[in-house]
Image (spheres, rainbow, N blue to C red):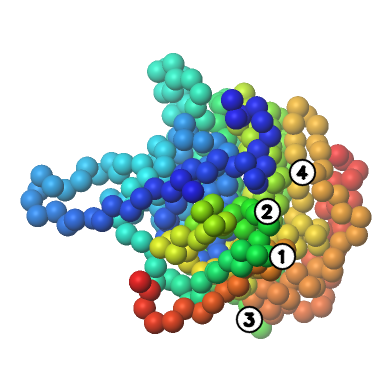
């Protein structure tokens, strides 16, 4: 949904480039991937759009996409609360293989 | 405006105001903050004292709150909020909310005097205590809200001592004894109830206080996907209650006719693994005494 975008942090080369100690609201410098051992995958045929997964996601990574609910895999930590709380068993946790992209 | 319409899980604002934080997977505290910030909206001043949520969201130069947020010292969450509220009034700001997110230790032990003072002054602030039942940020130490028998690093489970020796402080009664305009208890297991209570607190013209149960998979030793289900079970077995206090009246939002066995809830958590049957009966006895008091007094 309406999530802040990531701005890659450039390490300062001069004193004048160091950001103010007051951080601007909603600034993200990197993504969270690397935490995850399994990822949630939606079965769009079973999903009825009740949004209960959206309400219990601690990260806020579930959003309404063009073809039903989608997960932002850059920030999903793979906790699996969504899969456990889904009454229609529309979310399955698929083990991650190899490196995150 | 959208505020007049009742917020449900389907029409929650899509803007994520607490996003990209580095909390553990399945964190109940970050789920609390995310849901509360969705209801309060971007015109909010946030105060976070020393707790997990300030450790995972204020890492320079990133900032995970989508609104003004400030990290305060541990004991003065409520005092900082009072100051922000006074400044906002002096600047004649309209349509703003001042909210503070303290943990259970930051509320019931360390921040209690500042909170008591703020309730006494009746400043228009929302104080939120997300209760994960120990000092989780520093590595699971016992707090005043840790339940009886729970194992922490300062109340270890050994041959002599079996976890915490005393019962959980009754924080809700301490707060309502002040005659606060609005106080409530909620749980991340019941998101709709939580959203309704935050919306009520936002509309309240005085101090409001929310005590939200937010399980911590790391400290409670439960699987990371059971944060929400274990919060639900706590309510179902009667060890946590969903209640409101408004205009001097208590209201119970969920009054279970029958409780599920405490043992089932206890046995799922690693922090209670060492408890024997006698100690579980002691927890049950305490729970029944609490509910007798609730039914008599409210």
**Residue B259: percent from the left, percent from the top?**
87, 61
Residue B292 visible somewhere in the drawing: yes
Tell me the element at label 2.
loop
Label 4 and label 3: CA atoms lie apart by 36 Å
Residue B81 x/y as whole percent: 48, 33
Name which residue lies at 49% across and 48% down: A1
Q: Mark 3 = which residue?
A: B158
Mark 4 or 3: the one toward you: 4
Side of B103 where B186 appears, left or right: right
> Label 2 marks which chain's residue?
A
Residue drawn at (42%, 38%), measured in percent from left and top? B67
Residue located beneath label 4 in the image: B243
- The chain to which mark 1 is attached is A
Q: Are marks 4 and 2 on the same chain?
A: no
Say which residue label 1 marks.
Answer: A88
Which sits earlier in the primary sequence, circle 4 or circle 3? 3
The numbered mark, 1 or 2, whose residue comes first in the sequence reads 2
Q: CA distance from mark 4 to mark 2?
A: 26 Å
Name the quadrant containing residue B197: top right
């Amino acid at each position: 949904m309406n999530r802040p975008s990531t701005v890659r942090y450039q390490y300062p080369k001069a004193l004048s480039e160091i950001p103010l100690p007051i951080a601007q609201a909603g600034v993200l410098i990197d993504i969270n991937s690397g935490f995850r051992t399994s990822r949630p995958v939606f079965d769009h045929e079973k999903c009825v759009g009740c949004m209960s997964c959206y309400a219990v996601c601690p990260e806020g990574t579930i959003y309404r996409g063009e073809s039903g609910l989608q997960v932002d895999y850059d920030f999903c930590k793979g906790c699996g609360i969504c899969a456990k709380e889904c009454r229609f068993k529309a979310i399955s946790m698929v083990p991650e293989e190899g490196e995150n992209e | 405006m959208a505020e007049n319409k009742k917020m449900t899980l389907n029409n929650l604002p899509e803007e994520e105001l607490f996003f990209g934080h580095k909390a553990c997977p399945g964190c109940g505290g970050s789920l609390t903050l995310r849901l509360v910030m969705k209801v309060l909206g971007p015109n909010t001043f946030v105060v976070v004292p020393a707790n997990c949520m300030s450790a995972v969201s204020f890492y320079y130069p990133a900032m995970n709150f989508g609104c003004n947020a400030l990290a305060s010292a541990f004991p003065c969450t409520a005092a900082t909020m009072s100051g922000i509220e006074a400044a906002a009034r002096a600047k004649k700001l309209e349509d703003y909310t001042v909210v503070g997110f303290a943990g259970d230790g930051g509320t019931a032990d360390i921040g209690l005097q500042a909170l008591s003072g703020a309730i006494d002054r009746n400043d228009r602030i929302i104080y939120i205590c997300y209760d994960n039942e120990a000092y989780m940020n520093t590595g699971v130490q016992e707090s005043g809200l840790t339940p009886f028998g729970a194992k922490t690093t300062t109340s270890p489970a050994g041959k002599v001592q079996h976890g915490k020796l005393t019962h959980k402080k009754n924080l809700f009664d301490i707060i309502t004894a002040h005659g606060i305009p609005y106080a409530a208890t909620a749980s991340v297991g019941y998101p709709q109830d939580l959203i309704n209570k935050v919306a009520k607190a936002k509309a309240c013209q005085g101090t409001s206080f929310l005590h939200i149960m937010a399980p911590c998979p790391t400290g409670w030793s439960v699987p990371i996907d059971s944060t929400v289900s274990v919060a639900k079970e706590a309510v179902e077995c009667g060890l946590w209650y969903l209640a409101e206090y408004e205009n001097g009246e208590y209201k119970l939002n969920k009054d279970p006719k029958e409780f599920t066995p405490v043992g089932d809830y206890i046995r799922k958590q690693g922090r209670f693994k060492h408890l024997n049957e006698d100690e579980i009966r002691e927890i049950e006895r305490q729970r029944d005494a609490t509910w007798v008091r609730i039914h008599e007094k409210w």
